[in-house]
Amino acid sequence: MADKVLASVLIEPKKFELREFDMPEIGSDEGILRVERCGVCGSDVHGYERMGEGQRILGHENLGFIAKIGTNASKKWGVVEGDRVALEEYVPCGSCEMCRSGNYRFCPQTSAFGHDPSTPRLWYGSTALTVEPALWGGYSQYMYMHPGAVVHKVPTHIDPSEAAFFLPFGNGYEWAVEYGGATLGSTVVVQGPGQQGLAAVIAAREAGAACIIVSGLGHDEHRLEVARRLGADYTVDVSSEDLVQKVMEYTRGHGADVVVNVTGGGSTTVREGMDMAAFNGVVALPAAGNENISVGGTGRKNLTMKWCHGHSYKSVEHAIETIASGRYPIKEIVTHHFGLNDVKHAIDSVAGEGEAGAIHVSVDPWA
Ligand SMILES: [Zn+2]
Ligand SMILES: [Zn+2]
């Protein structure tokens, strides 16, 4: 194995530099991942604008091969050197109340929620270089696998760009199905046709939803077309059409059993979600904008609003299985990949300022 590691380091806001690191020594509970691809998350667009945690290697949607693994880690994760795996972004402790109750993404070692600021927060793509052994992000040839890493096996037949979509796709399952409750016969409205919105479309389809409606803006025309190819029954351009009216028309007055708001902005989208929800409907809010809502006037429809965060282990497993099945044209979503020299351009593209038509993009540190 190589003894040096090349990585792209965020040295100041929106500025990256290629740096060489020593390959870390590992103990029995740890491992080293040879990064094959790292997906660019929508949150990297905020991540690269601020230095909050200090200089660091970004990238938290990591896919790769086990390059080196300690004896205990091999037993615990059920993997050996050479196995293809995906790592979640979380690095939980495994023993706190959150971890023990299946909510490890809220573990204070990894989550900002309840974190003790006097200790470093461990979260791939976010932990600073000053925390040993520095290789906490996927925009790098190799990454450190902490004993708390959350590891999923990935079948080797999946194309790397498609496999690198596992995390946003896991979010799609979590938000549409686990939080939203999409199930056999549901009507599901997805507000926002970005990578996670498109993932929610597939998740809703897999859950057995009877009708899926996706909304977007005029410039989302191509994404709405992709949504239809993935299984959306209707798409609505909210710059020229009234979403609530359209949903009521398409559902013959029933409304949406599940609304997933992944707009990432807008000042009326939550209100619209409430207005188009069906009786007993659920409005899931993983990525809504800031909005003042008057709670009066919603009527007696037994509405549930849920603020959502991240994904469970199960949702990521579903995502990997669904990609592996080949049932959906995931290649329509995974539009671009870039080398380590182009990390800024990759993130710019996700922000809508780089390559036109980018939906999900990834970084190939060996390109
Ligand atoms: Zn992310
Ligand atoms: Zn914990």
Image: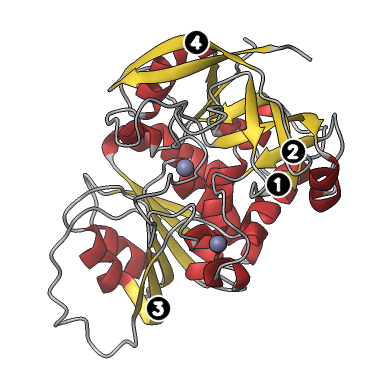
User: What is the spatial separation of the Cα atoms under label 2 and label 4, in whole angstroms?
Assistant: 25 Å
Q: Residue 230, relative to residue 132: is it above or below?
A: below
User: Residue 223 location in percent, x, y?
Assistant: 43, 37
Q: Earlier in the sequence, mark 1 or mark 4?
A: 4
**Comes first in the chain, label 2 or label 1:** 2
Numbered mark located on residue 242 in the image: none
Q: Secondary structure at mark 1?
A: strand
| Closest to the observer, 295 or 214 | 295
Mark 2, residue position: 85
The part of the image, by quadrant, that contains residue 62 is: top right
Q: Quadrant of the C terminus?
A: top right
120 shown above or below 26: below
Which sits earlier in the primary sequence, circle 3 or circle 2?
A: 2
In this picture, is 279 found above or below 325?
below
How far is the residue under mark 3 from the one under mark 2?
A: 37 Å
Is mark 2 in CB contact (under 8 Å) with mark 4? no
Type of the residue with mark 2: Val
Q: Nearer the viewer, mark 3 or mark 2?
A: 2
